[in-house]
Image (spheres, rainbow, N blue to C red):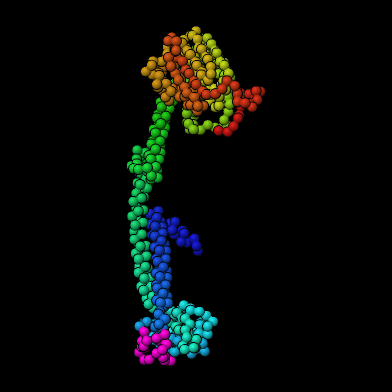
Amino acid sequence: MSAGPVARFRALPLRGRLALLVAVAVAVAVAAVATVAWFMVRTQLRDQLDASLRSTDARDQAKVLRVGCLSSPPVGGGQFVSNLNAIVQVNLADGGHCWLDGRDTLPVTRIEREIASGERGATMYDSTTLDGDRVRVYSQPALVDTQRVALAVAKPLADIDKPLSTLAWVLLLVSGIGAVGAGAAGLVVARTGLRPVDELTGAVEHIARTEDLTVRIPEEGDDEIARLSRSFNSMTAALASSRDRQAQLIADAGHELRTPLTSLRTNIELLARSEDTGRAIPPQDRRELLASVKAQMTELASLIGDLQELSRPDAAVPGPLQVVALHEIAETALSRARLRGPELVFGSDIRPWYVRGEAAALERAVMNVLDNAVKFSPPGGSVEVALRAGELTVRDHGPGIPAEELPHVFERFWRSPTARALPGSGLGLSIVDRTVRRAGGTAELRAAADGGPGTEAVLRIPGAPTPPPGTPSDGLAGGQWVVGEQ
């Protein structure tokens, strides 16, 4: 049963919940203040009434006692001895009493008998008259000649009950008005405070409906709503950039795939037509066609592998963090490069260097740089490879790259106009840059430092010339040690 109101409250819109909470909070605060005020006024009025009863002059009391008394007030009441505006009565220890003043008679209670007998001193207490009116009584011991009596002076509590009742209704009315006003103010505050949230909601709904990522929310101030707006704008900008890159990647990939696929289809159609028509292709031409098909399939496989590598998020580093022997990776890649360019002369100066990264990805990056050097080197040319203090340099003696094209060499699918006739997808250097940055380093392609022909590829990766302390020297397996989780 208790879940019902909670569920209904949660079902309210946020604006309604805020307004309701504000109204309840203000109503509770106003009710608490009103209650405290009522009790303070009540206490003050009672204190004043008690002070009034205690201030009765003893001479007036003596004067009252000399006048004589009646057993009950006369018809219509009366004031015979003073202007006290109160009930004055003498009470005896045996329960008798003598009425002196006022419009009603007080009962002789146990308290009065104890005061008259001397067992109790002056006392203030609440009582009820014989007519049923509530009164505040101040009774004190006195002497009539030589007889002990209790002199009781009483005033009606209606003198303070009526103002208190009126005050209670006024405070209740004020509390109700305050609660209603608080609810209205809560709605206004909620509507004003949640306006940026409404704008954010509208923007999200618009994006969900139209997929328009150019929508931006105004950023005003430095509060939490402004931070939320800035975060949303940053998110939509990142999504728009990601979508643009994805579209560009798809377009570029489609363009790059079209050429080998078209050539592959043409060669296969020639072979199929030869089989269908019975016209044999000369053996030399057939071997060239098959070699071309094989080369195009290899190019497609390489392009697909490059696309898969680039499809991984930049922040994704799979597997454990590894200490990698970069010099061994460079030696392995250099051995493979010698097989791809047997007519070239390779020089090397590779010194020990250990880094943290992905061994397979780093080997592929180094291999891509060496492949470019082999591809652009003239027959009989030379390629120098050096690894010193974390800087891997690969120098070729090819035609080089114009200075105006150097800023574009790490872009996806970008290829120099002079290299478009050569095999490749334009993704190799992009993968190199991505892998090196993932290892905390930088990649650079520049003109030869000595001013001669060719290009220098420089990969700078932070590390150390020795493995971390505690790493077993015989623990090398494929150039890497596992030292911890990323």
- Percent from the top left, x then y, of residue 57? 40, 80
- Percent from the top left, x then y, of residue 268? 47, 22
Which residue is found at the position 37% from the left and 42% from the top?
A: 222
Q: Is residue 168 above or below residue 481?
A: below
- Percent from the top left, x then y, of residue 16? 38, 56
Viewer-nearest residue: 109 or 168: 109
Q: Which residues are magenta?
A: 62-82
Residue 278: tell me if it is visible: no
Q: Quadrant of the C terminus?
A: top right
Viewer-nearest residue: 200 or 38: 38
| Picture quadrant of residue 226 | top left
Residue 82: tell me if it is visible: yes
- Percent from the top left, x then y, of residue 127? 46, 81
Q: Is residue 398 above or below residue 40?
A: above
Viewer-nearest residue: 419 or 81: 81
Viewer-nearest residue: 186 or 158: 158
Count of numbered tags: 0
Which residue is found at the position 39% from the left and 21% from the top?
A: 407
Give the main secondary structure, helix, strand or loop, of the magenta stretch.
Answer: loop
Q: Is residue 113 above or below residue 470?
A: below
| Picture quadrant of residue 176 | bottom left
Which residue is found at the position 54% from the left and 22% from the top?
A: 363
Residue 397 in magenta? Answer: no
Which residue is found at the position 53% from the left and 15% from the top?
A: 386
Q: Is residue 237 above or below residue 476?
A: below
| Picture quadrant of residue 478 | top right
